[in-house]
Structure formats: structure tokens, C-alpha cells
Image: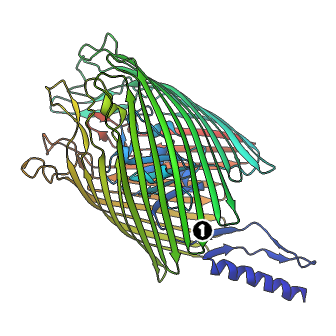
């Protein structure tokens, strides 16, 4: 009788997982003598399709990539373009579907990384070592309880920090090409419902990589100068149930090498130095009441310091500057979600943020920006159909003592709507989103360049996609494809309106982009083996639609936007050993309307990473750009060729 009871319990569990759309790989369900069923460790894989268009890397796949910073991981996603000025210390920014880096919101545990000064996030400052997953959402994430800020970007990147499951201590030492040395220490704890970590990392690199330079004047091999960096990053986090907190500190000094203008043998050298200090503290608390009501509160304070100096004897033809910028940011958010019916969810929220910017530039007065956001959103999930819609209100007001005064207040409503339907195991989706980016403080108030009359830069996005997931036994696979249209009006650009050396910010231009993103991934896990394949494809045509009378630029491709790019990554692991091989291809890109024939050449970038764990030690060897391909993301800023990384870590 007890054996029959155990079998019935096992059958009930299996049916419950099947009916909720989950697959359970659990073979050790044992009926105890007292009829209490004990479950050994098992793996549960969710098959419910997301309504939003999302790409994600997590767990072992994320750590298996030959990458160090967030930018290195995101480059494997479809629709992504990374602008990299070369080397470990080079600025790294993200562009998704050619919308521009200011239209990308980057979030750590649901709270946005902000920069009111220039609106961009340097992804090179953030490490993968503390992360559990990296996800890219076109438009925005669609959860039941979100802050208004999460709706306010053309696309969003979510960084989820790792929640430790046990106590551990990790010490890491690394060596890499170009005189690069790395050290890291991490302590994790998990006890009595609390968990957290303290993580610190130090890197020093000369960045003196060799490169081949070919122009009409010469064809030679040079070595990158003034591309060094030294930085210290420290993070700490504490979690418990619905509470999470995060503290971050980063300080660095780096060289700014500039571009190769004519020939390597020129005596002219563009030398600059940059000092950065960034810190923030943030916390979030979410509580669900009676499984119907949910409250969420976010808070954050951030401080950034930047010094840029070019006052060196070598800079004979460069303006000598020594500028200091200080930026502070305070943010609070409250949101409420309710599910009055099983198929209906409603979300409302309010954000308030204030930012201060001060600098020692001539004729510059401190600027303070106060912005508010409010959102009302609804989600309907009825049988096989799903709907998500939102209306976002944004308000910006600046305060300054400048004689020219502050820009006029800005307020706008913007909508978005997403439809989904499950048909024979295939998830279909269609969405539309209208959003804008407000002019940054640099756009409006930068000395001799800023323009107080700038309008917001609008984007309208249309998307139609499908997704299929499969899981059975040792096999898992997923495929998705999206076709999209993007329109951008009132692009904010910097143009020389008052002479060659006097530039001004202005609204100029309309662009139209049509494209296709597709991803295919698969995994086969027999016994102790694991085989994974990740692929991504991007085809897009991003063109200038500003002035039909301008035959030289109308309907021409937007600079730096490749028509075709793709990535393939294969991971083979056996027990505690893994081998990762990835190939990233980027097609040719125009970079100047002045000479349409002067293009950035296409390139392949093959990376290899071998990792093994031996009791308490883990060793990894990486070879990046295996075939030493010479390429550029930005013209005249050569990227490093083949380079090596050796890492050894000890965990206890």
C-alpha cells in the first residue's frame, strides 16, 4: 500500500510539472517508510515563453565565454554593436539596433546606471565576476511590478548579481599579454536566510599592443602608446528574500592614445590622461501580500568624478586642458502591482531623480536636473493570448545660474503595447514602442557647444517575432527570430555651424532602419558531457532619411552600422573541464559621408578558452583573436591582435 502511495505521489508530481509547462529531470524520487516523499537534487527548466524580445546568458555559459567585461559578453547578442576605442582601457559603449548608446538603459538588479552628463555607460567598468546573468531586452522587460525608469529606454540590459548559496573564499591571479596583471579576491556567505558577497579586483596594464597600420603614406607595424590603465574595483552586496542591496566603487587612471591621423612616423602625438572615481549604493525591497498585492521600493545614490588632462609638452597641436567634473545623483522609486483576477495584472509606479553637475570649465555654472516619471501598465494573460500595454509620463526641469538660462521644461507621454499568442508550441509576438531621450547636460550646457533649444530625440519601434523552445531528456533547444522597423526623429548631433573649430549641438536628421535578428541555441547533456551551441544573426539596413534634396547622403547607410553580422559559440564540457570556441563576424561599415568608398573592412574574431578545475584550483587559458586579425571598431583606433590570458584561482 505504501509503495502504491509513493507511486501515486510521483505521478502527481510529474503531472503537476507537465501541466504548469515545466520539465523535471528528477529520477531519484524516493518514498520513505513513513510515506514522506524525499526529493534529491534535480533540475527544473521553465518552458513558458517570455512575452518580451529577450536574449540572455547565465551560469556556466556566461562564465565560459572568453570575456572580462560586460561589453565582451554583449557582443555575442543579435542586434548589438560595440564601439570600442581599443585596449583594456578603451571606452566601450553599446548600440542596439542602431538606436544609439543613449537609448540603451543598463540596470543592476533592476536599478539603472545613470550618467546625466553624457547619457552613456562605459561597460568596461563592470565585471562579469559578480554576475549571475546578463540579459538584453529590445524595448523593455515585462514583469508584474516594475519601476517607471524600466520603461524609459529604447532597449534595456539587465545585470543580475549572483546570490551565493554557501560560504566560500576565492583568490585569483592572472597574467595577460601587453604587460597585463590581474588580482581578485571574493568572499561569499549564505546563512539564516541572508546571503551576500564582497568582491575586489585590481588590474594594471601597459596596453602596448602591436598593430599593423596601412595608409597611402606607409605600410608598417607600430606599437600602441599611452593605452595603459590601472584600476581598482570593489563591490559588496547583501540579499534576503525580497531585499537586495549593492555597493560599488571604481577608481582608475588611464591613457587616452587618440587616433592615428596620417602616419606612424609623424612626431605629432595626441596624449591625454583620464582619472575616474565612481561609487554608488543602492537598495531594493519588494513584498507580496496575499499573493495579489505587491509593493516595491528602490533607492540609490551615486557619485562620479572625472578629470581629463592634455597639458603635456608632447601635445604641440592639441588644446591644453585640465578639466574636472563632479556628478551626483539621488534616486527613489515606488511601484505597486495588483492581480485582481488570475488573468489580469495592473502596475503603477512613480520615480523621482535629481542630478547635479559641476565643473571647473570657464563660463560654466553648476547645473541641477530634476526628473520625474510615472507609469501605468496592464498585463492580460488569457488562455493562449497575452497583452501588455503601458503609458509612461516623463518630466524634466533644469536649474542653472548661467546668464543664458536653463532649457525649457520637458514633459511627454509615450505609449507601448505588446501582443503575444501561443500557437502549436510556437510563441508569436508583436510590439510597438514610442520613446524619447532627453538632451543630456553636455548637449545643453557644454561650454561653447551646448544648445538650450534642443528637442528630445524620438524613436518609434515596430517588431514582429516568433520563438520556439524544446526540452526532452538530455536535449534542449530554442530558436527565435524578429523583424523590426525603427524610426528616429530629431537626432541630436554635433556639427560645425560657426566655422571649422566651433561646433554646436543641434537636432538634425531622420533615420529609418529595417532589420532581422535571429538566434538559435541547443544543448545536449549525456551523462558527464555537455555540448552547447549558441548562434546569433543580424541583418539590418539603417539609412539616412533627413533631406531628400541631398543626393550625397539621402538613403545612404548610417555610419558604423554593418549590414550583416553573426556569431557562433560552441562549448564542450566534461565533468570539470570545458572548451569554448567562438567566432564573431562583423561586415563592412561606412564611417564617413565625405568619402563613401572609405569603409571599415569586415573581420572575423575567433576566441578560444580552456578551463579546468582540480579540487580547490581552477585554471583557464584564453587566446583572443586567434588568427591575429587586424581590425577597427572606430577608424584610426586599431584593436589588439592575438593576445593571451592565463588565470589561476583558488576556492575554499
Residue at left offset 16%, top offset 49%: 546
Left of 480 or right of it: where is 171? right
Q: Which quadrant holds the N terminus?
A: bottom right
Indicate the quadrant where residue 324 lies.
top left
Q: Is residue 283 visible?
A: yes
**In the structure shown, which secondary structural element does the residue marked by tag 1 occupy?**
strand
Q: Is residue 138 visible?
A: no
Pick the residue in front: 182 or 412: 412
Residue at left offset 63%, top offset 55%: 295
Residue 571 % position (x, y): 53, 58
Residue 342 % position (x, y): 60, 75
Query: Callout 1 environment at 10 Å: few (<14), some (14 to 19), or many (20+)?
Result: some
Pick the residue in front: 187 or 608: 187
Q: Is residue 62 above or below residue 211?
A: below
Residue 533 % position (x, y): 49, 63
Residue farthest to the top?
313
Q: Which quadrant holds the C terminus?
A: top right
Left of 310 or right of it: where is 354? right
Residue 497 % position (x, y): 15, 31
Pick the residue in front: 374 or 136: 374
Please say which color scheme the image uses: rainbow
Task: State the residue position of label 1.
Answer: 339
Left of 481 or right of it: where is 29? right
Residue at left offset 61%, top offset 44%: 130
Residue at left offset 44%, top offset 37%: 370
Q: Is residue 408 above or below residue 61?
A: above
Q: How many marks?
A: 1
Amino acid at each position: 500500500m505504501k509503495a502504491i502511495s509513493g507511486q501515486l505521489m510521483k505521478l502527481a508530481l510529474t503531472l503537476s510539472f507537465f501541466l504548469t509547462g515545466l520539465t523535471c529531470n528528477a529520477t531519484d524520487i524516493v518514498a520513505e517508510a513513513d510515506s514522506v516523499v524525499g526529493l534529491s537534487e534535480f533540475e527544473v527548466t521553465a518552458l513558458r515563453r517570455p512575452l518580451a524580445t529577450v536574449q540572455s546568458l547565465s551560469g556556466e555559459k556566461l562564465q565560459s565565454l572568453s570575456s572580462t567585461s560586460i561589453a565582451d559578453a554583449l557582443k555575442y547578442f543579435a542586434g548589438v554593436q560595440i564601439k570600442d576605442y581599443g585596449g583594456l582601457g578603451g571606452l566601450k559603449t553599446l548600440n542596439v539596433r542602431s538606436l544609439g548608446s543613449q537609448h540603451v538603459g543598463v540596470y543592476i538588479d533592476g536599478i539603472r546606471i545613470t550618467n546625466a552628463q553624457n547619457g552613456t555607460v562605459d561597460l568596461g567598468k563592470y565585471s562579469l565576476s559578480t554576475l549571475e546573468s546578463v540579459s538584453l531586452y529590445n524595448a523593455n522587460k515585462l514583469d508584474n511590478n516594475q519601476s517607471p525608469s524600466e520603461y524609459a529606454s529604447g532597449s534595456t540590459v539587465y545585470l543580475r548579481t549572483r546570490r551565493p548559496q554557501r560560504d566560500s573564499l576565492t583568490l585569483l591571479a592572472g597574467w595577460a599579454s601587453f604587460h597585463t596583471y590581474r588580482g581578485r579576491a571574493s568572499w561569499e556567505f549564505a546563512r539564516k536566510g541572508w546571503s551576500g558577497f564582497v568582491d575586489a579586483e585590481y588590474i594594471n596594464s601597459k596596453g602596448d599592443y602591436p598593430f599593423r597600420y596601412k595608409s597611402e603614406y606607409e605600410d608598417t607595424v607600430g606599437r600602441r602608446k599611452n593605452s595603459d590603465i590601472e584600476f581598482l574595483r570593489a563591490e559588496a552586496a547583501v540579499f534576503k528574500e525580497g531585499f537586495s542591496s549593492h555597493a560599488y566603487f571604481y577608481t582608475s587612471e588611464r591613457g587616452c592614445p587618440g587616433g592615428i591621423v596620417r602616419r606612424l612616423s609623424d612626431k605629432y602625438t595626441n596624449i591625454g590622461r583620464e582619472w575616474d572615481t565612481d561609487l554608488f549604493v543602492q537598495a531594493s525591497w519588494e513584498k507580496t501580500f496575499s499573493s495579489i498585492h505587491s509593493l516595491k521600493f528602490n533607492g540609490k545614490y551615486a557619485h562620479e568624478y572625472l578629470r581629463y588632462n592634455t597639458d603635456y609638452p608632447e601635445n604641440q597641436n592639441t588644446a591644453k586642458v585640465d578639466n574636472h567634473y563632479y556628478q551626483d545623483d539621488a534616486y527613489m522609486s515606488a511601484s505597486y502591482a495588483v492581480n485582481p483576477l488570475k488573468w489580469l495584472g495592473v502596475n503603477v509606479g512613480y520615480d523621482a531623480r535629481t542630478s547635479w553637475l559641476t565643473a571647473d570649465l570657464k563660463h560654466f555654472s553648476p547645473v541641477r536636473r530634476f526628473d520625474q516619471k510615472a507609469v501605468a501598465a496592464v498585463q492580460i494573460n488569457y488562455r493562449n493570448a497575452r497583452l501588455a500595454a503601458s503609458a509612461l509620463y516623463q518630466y524634466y526641469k533644469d536649474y542653472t545660474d548661467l546668464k543664458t538660462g536653463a532649457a525649457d521644461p520637458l514633459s511627454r507621454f509615450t505609449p507601448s503595447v505588446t501582443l503575444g499568442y501561443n500557437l502549436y508550441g510556437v510563441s508569436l509576438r508583436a510590439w510597438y514602442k514610442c520613446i524619447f531621450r532627453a538632451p543630456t547636460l553636455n548637449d545643453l550646457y557644454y561650454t561653447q557647444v551646448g544648445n538650450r533649444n534642443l528637442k528630445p530625440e524620438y524613436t518609434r519601434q515596430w517588431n514582429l517575432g516568433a520563438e520556439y523552445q524544446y526540452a526532452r531528456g538530455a536535449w534542449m533547444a530554442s530558436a527565435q527570430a524578429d523583424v523590426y522597423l525603427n524610426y528616429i526623429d530629431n537626432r541630436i548631433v554635433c556639427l560645425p555651424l560657426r566655422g571649422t573649430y566651433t561646433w554646436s549641438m543641434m537636432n538634425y536628421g531622420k533615420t529609418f532602419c529595417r532589420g532581422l535578428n535571429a538566434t538559435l541555441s541547443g544543448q545536449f547533456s549525456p551523462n558527464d558531457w555537455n555540448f552547447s551551441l549558441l548562434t546569433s544573426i543580424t541583418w539590418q539596413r539603417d539609412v539616412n532619411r533627413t533631406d531628400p534634396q541631398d543626393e550625397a547622403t539621402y538613403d545612404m547607410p548610417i555610419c558604423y552600422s554593418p549590414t550583416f553580422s553573426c556569431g557562433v559559440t560552441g562549448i564542450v564540457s566534461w565533468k570539470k573541464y570545458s572548451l569554448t570556441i567562438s567566432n564573431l563576424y562583423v561586415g563592412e561599415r561606412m564611417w564617413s559621408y565625405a568619402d563613401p568608398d572609405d569603409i571599415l573592412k569586415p573581420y572575423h574574431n575567433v576566441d578560444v578558452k580552456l578551463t579546468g578545475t582540480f579540487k580547490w584550483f581552477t585554471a583557464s587559458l584564453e587566446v583572443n583573436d586567434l588568427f591575429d586579425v587586424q581590425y577597427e571598431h572606430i577608424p584610426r583606433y586599431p584593436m589588439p591582435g592575438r593576445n593571451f590570458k592565463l588565470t589561476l584561482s583558488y576556492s575554499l
